[in-house]
Image (cartoon, rainbow, N blue to C red):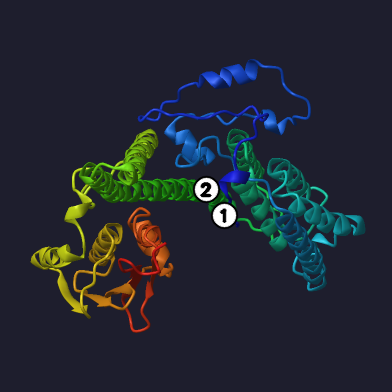
Amino acid sequence: MSIPTPADERTPDHAGTSAQATTTDGDSRANASTADTHSATIPTGITSEDLIGTPIGTRLWRNIAGIPEPAPEGWVRRKPTRAERRTDVVLGLILAIAMALSEWSANAAGVYGDLGESALWVRIAYPSMALIIVSFRRRTPIIALLVATVVFIGGFFIPYHELFFTQMLYFVVFYSAGAWSRHRNASAWVRLTVAGGTISWVMLGIVVSFVMNEPIDLPTPTANTGAYAVFTILANFTYYVGAYVLGNIDYVRTGHAALATEQARVLREQRTKLADQAVKLDRVRIARELHDAVAHHVSLMGLQAAVARRSLPAGEESARAREQLEAVEANAREAIEELQGILATLRASESDTGMVPVVGAEPDHRTVSPSTRGVAQLPELVEQLRQAGMSLSFATVGDPQPLTQSADLSAYRIVQEALTNVRKHAGASATAEVRLRYGRERLEIDVTDDGFGPIGGATASTQVELASGGRGILGMRERASAVGGTLEAGPRSDGGFRVRASLPLKGSRGLS
């Protein structure tokens, strides 16, 4: 059986079914929307099957009817696909051919003794009916069961001498009524009535034979009616209970699978939403850090312009220079105001989206000045992680060169985030290495570990991003890109994981 998806297993709006609710002790409660639905005008195009409700009932009745409690709200099993319908036609054709061959070979071998052969039209009609019934066993399971019951019982009166494949056919149809009927109340009552009526009819025949002191009419007549009665009870009880229970199990299992699929879909949506929010939050933080860095330099420029203006001697040339310096001061003040306005807008957007810092994550940049975080603080960060039990080494290659304040902060944050990911995902026994390489124009940051890396076949970048709520590789790449740098991350060929970033040095052409 195929596992359904939530999209094709929701109750149609016009079907008259509504959300179902139960109390913890199993007692049913009528849903207000149900009453409203039934009191409304029935739209055209609704079949009688659509009008058969699915009552909640007690917990016992839910088990009898095969109503799955853990299932999406309003869920019913989807209708069979075109491929499944073709499969049913093929199965019906196989059973029809098997019935015809079985009936012919059994009569030719004298298995049925003196009962004789069935009429030719019966030998043609029964396999043909088997083909039709099996072909519709999943499309209209209740109707297929009722027709199969009439055909099955009619075979004892016509008669039709084929026992093995006819009973196999009836078992499949009885099972399908429990596994595929979307209306559990009707399905349960029909199956209980058919099973109880059939067993009662068989037992009535045995009782009549016992009272009349006549042997049971079988290919090999038996005079031990009591023993035959016990055999018949066991056979019929096992037959019907097996088909009934297996049908319910299949329907309930499908409901559980639909719930698992629905929950997985919701989790994927929530995870994507959280990742998007985390990216937005990271961008807001980067903008805040850039604001602090740029605002510092612009304010300094304005202050220096003011000092220079006041230091100018009197004169016509000095007056022109004084005007230009006043323009620099004005532009600096205007730039500061615009930066503050943009930052206020970003913070308001952050509040509106409900984004909050992750507990246990890096400190909020609103309380930690960017000027206190940079490459110079990386040894302190490494030492803190070592004291926390992390196996970590740190080295610098080349002569340290100055970076812009934004690039300096980004370098610190990239190393911090990379080591956080090592601690989270590489395993307790992993060893990490941090290397800084100063070139002529760029700073190369290399963070590697020898841990077990991604789990379950996910790509490395996806694994880290999802595990950290979207604040992993994507956030580091955003930081590098914001200062004109690049970042690469992925699994190492010999095991573990590597994060490599390249940031421009101060005054290099890499920073635009």
**Residue with the most extreme front position:** 315
Q: How many marks?
A: 2
Tell me where residue 280 appears, x and y as whole percent.
40, 47
Identify the residue position indicated by label 1 in the image: 3
Disc 1 crowd, CA 10 A, few/some/many (<14, 14-19, 20+): some
Q: Which part of the image, by quadrant, shows the C terminus?
A: bottom left
Type of residue at label 2?
Answer: Ala
Q: For the point 79% across and 47% down, which residue is it?
A: 157
To which quarter of the image does residue 106 belong? bottom right
**Residue with the most extreme bottom position:** 494
Q: For the point 52% across and 18% down, which residue is it?
A: 32
At mark 1, the secondary structure is loop
Tell me where residue 404 appears, x and y as whole percent.
28, 61
Tell me where residue 249 appears, x and y as whole percent.
51, 50
The answer to whether residue 89 of the structure is visible from this angle is yes
At mark 2, the secondary structure is helix
Which residue is nearer to you in this view: 229 or 420?
420
Q: Which part of the image, by quadrant, shows the N terminus?
A: bottom right
Type of residue at label 1?
Answer: Ile
- Among the two numbered marks 2 and 1 on one chain, the one whose residue lies closer to the N terminus: 1
Tell me whether circle 2 and circle 1 mark residues in contact (CB < 8 Å). yes
Which residue is nearer to you in this view: 38 or 58?
38
Decide if residue 152 is on the left or right side of residue 442: right
**Residue with the most extreme top position:** 39
Disc 2 crowd, CA 10 A, few/some/many (<14, 14-19, 20+): many
Identify the residue position indicated by label 2 in the image: 258
Which residue is nearer to you in this view: 316 or 323?
316
Which residue is nearer to you in this view: 194 or 158?
194
Q: For the point 17% across and 75% down, which residue is it?
A: 394
Decide if residue 351 is on the left or right side of residue 386: right
Tell me where residue 60 appears, x and y as whole percent.
44, 35
